[in-house]
């Protein structure tokens, strides 16, 4: 009987160890997710979904204790990372390296883009090219119209969205729309407010020093 008890204890211990190992692996994945998102909002939700089982009470209790300890450890790390990255992002936005766009309902306001497209390329948008306030829709409409006019002149045309350009100081500027016509490229921006205007004026000079002339489509005076 003692031998059977020892075997049962060993088997139970092995089951607990295996469950703890699985739970530790799951918690590690959860921690990695928290670091990637710089957020703790999903920590406990993901933990209870992946680490708690009614058929493994003992290992679940150990997992909860382990999860609490790890949560206490990573909380200040995540908060510091979020604050640091937030400051960096704010600085990038201020410099015009990164543009933030929020949907605006401009469709009913009958607003037409003003642009330097005519002075740079000798073409212009039609009068019915109205701004919608949605960057994806506006970019699609602008690209479609420019492409048709450029290709009608037997010139090559291509574009990229959210394209990176390395500036002279080594920083990477994220260009909302990067248009290429016959091997000449034009960083292209959509300007919906005064903040965008200030950003464009800053980044335009830095892009010019890299050899790029920038195109803008703006709903405000430039």
Image (spheres, rainbow, N blue to C red):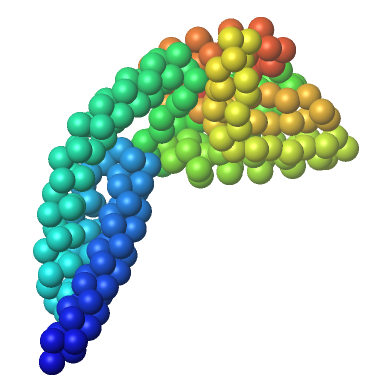
Along the line of sight, the residue nearer the viewer: 197 or 71: 71
Q: Residue at x 25, y 63 (%)?
A: 20
Which image quadrant: the N terminus? bottom left
Dividing the picture into quadrants, the one containing residue 145 is top right
Along the line of sight, the residue nearer the viewer: 197 or 205: 205
Dividing the picture into quadrants, the one containing residue 11 is bottom left
Q: Residue at x 83, y 30 (%)?
A: 182
Q: Is residue 89 left or right of residue 77?
A: right
Work out whether residue 147 can be spotted: yes
Residue 147 percent coordinates (x, y): 72, 40
In this view, 19 is above or below 174: below
Along the line of sight, the residue nearer the viewer: 77 or 97: 77
In this view, 121 is above or below 139: above
Q: Residue at x 25, y 32 (%)?
A: 77
Residue 201 percent coordinates (x, y): 51, 10
In this view, 167 is above or below 1: above
Q: Is residue 91 left or right of residue 212?
A: left
Q: Residue furthest right?
A: 154
Along the line of sight, the residue nearer the viewer: 200 or 128: 200
Q: Residue at x 73, y 25 (%)?
A: 185
Residue 143 percent coordinates (x, y): 64, 39
Q: Is residue 42 left or right of residue 173?
A: left
């Amino acid at each position: 009987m003692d031998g059977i008890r020892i075997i049962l204890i060993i088997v139970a211990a092995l089951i607990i160890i295996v469950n703890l190992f699985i739970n530790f692996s799951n918690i590690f994945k959860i921690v990695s997710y928290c670091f990637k998102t710089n957020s703790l909002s999903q920590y406990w939700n993901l933990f209870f979904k992946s680490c708690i089982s009614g058929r493994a009470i003992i290992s679940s209790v150990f997992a909860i204790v382990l999860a609490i300890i790890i949560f206490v450890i990573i909380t200040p790390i995540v908060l510091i990372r979020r604050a640091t990255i937030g400051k960096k992002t704010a600085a990038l936005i201020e410099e015009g390296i990164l543009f933030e766009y929020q949907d605006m309902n401009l469709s009913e306001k009958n607003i037409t883009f003003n642009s330097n497209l005519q002075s740079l390329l000798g073409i212009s948008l039609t009068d019915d090219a109205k701004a919608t306030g949605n960057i994806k829709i506006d970019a699609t409409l602008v690209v479609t119209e420019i492409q048709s006019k450029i290709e009608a002149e037997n010139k090559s045309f291509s574009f990229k969205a959210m394209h990176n350009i390395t500036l002279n100081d080594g920083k990477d500027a994220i260009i909302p729309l990067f248009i290429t016509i016959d091997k000449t490229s034009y960083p292209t921006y959509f300007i919906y407010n005064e903040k965008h205007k200030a950003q464009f004026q800053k980044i335009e000079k830095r892009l010019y020093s890299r050899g790029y002339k920038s195109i803008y489509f703006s709903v405000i005076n430039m």
